[in-house]
């Protein structure tokens, strides 16, 4: 680290130190979220008469609430983005979101139905403030055309998945085996750690995520001028990418709902006769694969690009959608095995999560970076909010698909996702060239910029 530079311009491993502050903040925020998510549907369907009672709901009721909750968590990013753009700035809105999350996860640790709903409300509000703005701040650490931006988002994404890996193991084990609310309480501790890191690291985020002042002539000009034709074209492409995001997460988020219940109720989780693996532990498989495969996938795309092959963000998103969809082919096989024997093997779940992970690594990190490249500066946070809202709508559709599976059958749902989602990805690949023209070269001419000066009013 170069100590001659001001704190907010110091670098570590070739990236601004502020990236690692956001990395650890997001790591612990995701630890709290995924810890709660791993327990959510399992807690709702747990019987009320056991030593570790839940609410005793049916699968359909639990999946319905899961869909609404996860949708609202991400749709709240729209007002969260508006608050950042118009009132507080990204940096302060992230701070507010962290505080709300600390309250929400702490309330969930209390054992009553009222506190469960109240805790969910605070988490919805907290994620809405934090999620879109912390992602925009990562983009704000880099100048336009800096090729380190995509790698910066991959590093940031690793923080998400380290938290996502640890949470289901720790919170899930404690919640299922000891007490659901102890598991929720451990998630709260994770969020307090994330908030502490963010507060401590403010000196490394100077000039990033500040509110654009209408008194400043330059900022006033940016806020008041109408969108240019190029910016309007880029917004059209972003809106299309949001449709793909809805579809991606509608399938992918079966993990926390339908596939979580499938692991609990229809999967043989016996580990060589030694012990039974808690169903919530399977929620960590996706993050484990991301941690172990992120470098491999990133290196593949870098090598692919250097050979002059197609490597645009839209191309990667479409490829990721197809690969993720093919993962449901394994769940189709699992449902066939269950129909024949009354149980399905764990390896079907693991193979499905492997394909889901590779698809996610192709699509999700670059979609975040893609937004920061194309979004007009004055709408940066609200457009990032729309991205997370699209993720939320995908989560709601995931809940509806999960509900439908209880009537249509899991085989039909898994097979349908495999075929339909793959076909949609192929269609995007076929119309890729005209879509790329609408980006007006936003991803062309990227070069490495060693000067890590932040973009003012990111």
Image (spheres, grey):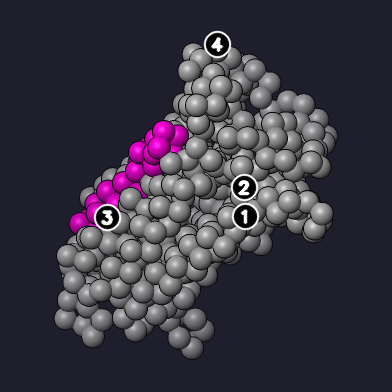
Task: Please give the range of residues in magenta.
Answer: 59-87
Q: Which residue is drawn at 40% across and 37% down?
A: 87
Secondary structure of the magenta portion, mostly?
helix
Residue at mark 4 to residue at mark 1: CA–CA distance: 38 Å
Residue 33 location, x and y as percent?
42, 61
Magenta segment includes 247:
no
The correct choice, above or below, for 140 with respect to 102 in the image is above
Residue 226 location, x and y as percent?
49, 13
Residue at mark 1 to residue at mark 2: CA–CA distance: 6 Å
Whichever of labels 4 and 1 marks the residue nearer the N terminus, that label is 1
Whichever of labels 2 and 4 marks the residue nearer the N terminus, that label is 2
Residue at mark 4 to residue at mark 3: CA–CA distance: 40 Å
> Does the residue at mark 1 contact the one at mark 2 (Cβ under 8 Å)?
yes
Whichever of labels 4 and 3 marks the residue nearer the N terminus, that label is 3
Circle 1 is placed at which residue position?
A: 203
Indicate the secondary structure of the residue bearing disc 4. helix
> Does the residue at mark 2 contact the one at mark 4 (Cβ under 8 Å)?
no
> Would you call the spot at circle 1 few (<14 residues within 10 Å), some (14-19), or many (20 or more)?
some
**Foreground pick, 345 / 66:** 66
Circle 3 is placed at which residue position?
A: 121
């Amino acid at each position: 680290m170069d100590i001659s530079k001001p704190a907010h311009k110091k670098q570590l491993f070739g990236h601004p130190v502020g990236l690692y502050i956001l990395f650890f903040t997001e790591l612990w925020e995701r630890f709290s979220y995924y810890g709660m998510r791993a327990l959510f549907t399992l807690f709702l369907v747990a019987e009320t008469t056991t030593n570790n009672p839940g609410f005793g709901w049916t699968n359909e009721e639990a999946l319905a609430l899961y869909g609404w909750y996860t949708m609202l968590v991400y749709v709240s990013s729209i007002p969260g983005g508006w608050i950042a753009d118009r009132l507080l700035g990204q940096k302060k809105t992230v701070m507010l979101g962290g505080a709300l999350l600390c309250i929400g996860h702490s309330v969930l640790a209390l054992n009553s139905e009222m506190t469960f709903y109240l805790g969910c409300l605070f988490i919805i509000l907290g994620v809405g403030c934090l999620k879109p703005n912390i992602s925009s701040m990562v983009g704000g650490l880099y100048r336009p055309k800096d090729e380190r931006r995509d790698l910066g988002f991959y590093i940031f994404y690793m923080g998400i998945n380290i938290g996502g890996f640890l949470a289901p193991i720790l919170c899930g084990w404690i919640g299922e085996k000891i007490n659901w609310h102890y598991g929720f309480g451990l998630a709260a501790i994770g969020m307090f750690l994330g908030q502490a890191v963010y507060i401590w690291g403010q000196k490394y985020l100077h000039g990033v995520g500040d509110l654009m002042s209408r008194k400043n002539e330059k900022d006033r000009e940016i806020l008041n001028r109408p969108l240019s034709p190029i910016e309007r074209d880029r917004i059209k492409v972003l809106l299309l990418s949001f449709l793909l995001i809805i579809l991606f997460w509608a399938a992918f988020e079966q993990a926390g709902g339908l596939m979580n219940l499938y692991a609990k109720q229809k999967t043989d989780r016996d580990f060589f006769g030694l012990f039974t693996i808690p169903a919530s532990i399977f929620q960590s498989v996706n993050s484990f694969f991301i941690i172990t495969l992120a470098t491999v996938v990133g290196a593949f795309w870098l090598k692919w690009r250097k050979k002059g092959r197609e490597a645009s963000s839209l191309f990667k998103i479409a490829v990721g959608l197809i690969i993720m969809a093919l993962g449901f082919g394994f769940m189709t096989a699992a449902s066939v095995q269950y129909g024949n024997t009354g149980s399905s093997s764990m390896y079907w779940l693991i193979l499905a999560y492997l394909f889901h992970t590779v698809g996610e690594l192709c699509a999700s990190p670059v979609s975040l970076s893609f937004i920061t490249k194309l979004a007009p500066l004055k709408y940066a946070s609200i457009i990032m909010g729309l991205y997370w809202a699209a993720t939320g709508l995908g989560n709601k559709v995931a809940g509806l698909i999960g509900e439908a599976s209880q009537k249509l059958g899991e085989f039909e749902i898994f097979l349908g996702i495999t075929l339909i989602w793959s076909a949609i990805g192929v269609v995007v690949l076929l119309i890729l060239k005209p879509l790329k023209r609408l980006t007006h070269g936003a991803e062309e001419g990227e070069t490495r910029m060693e000067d890590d000066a932040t973009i003012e009013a990111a």
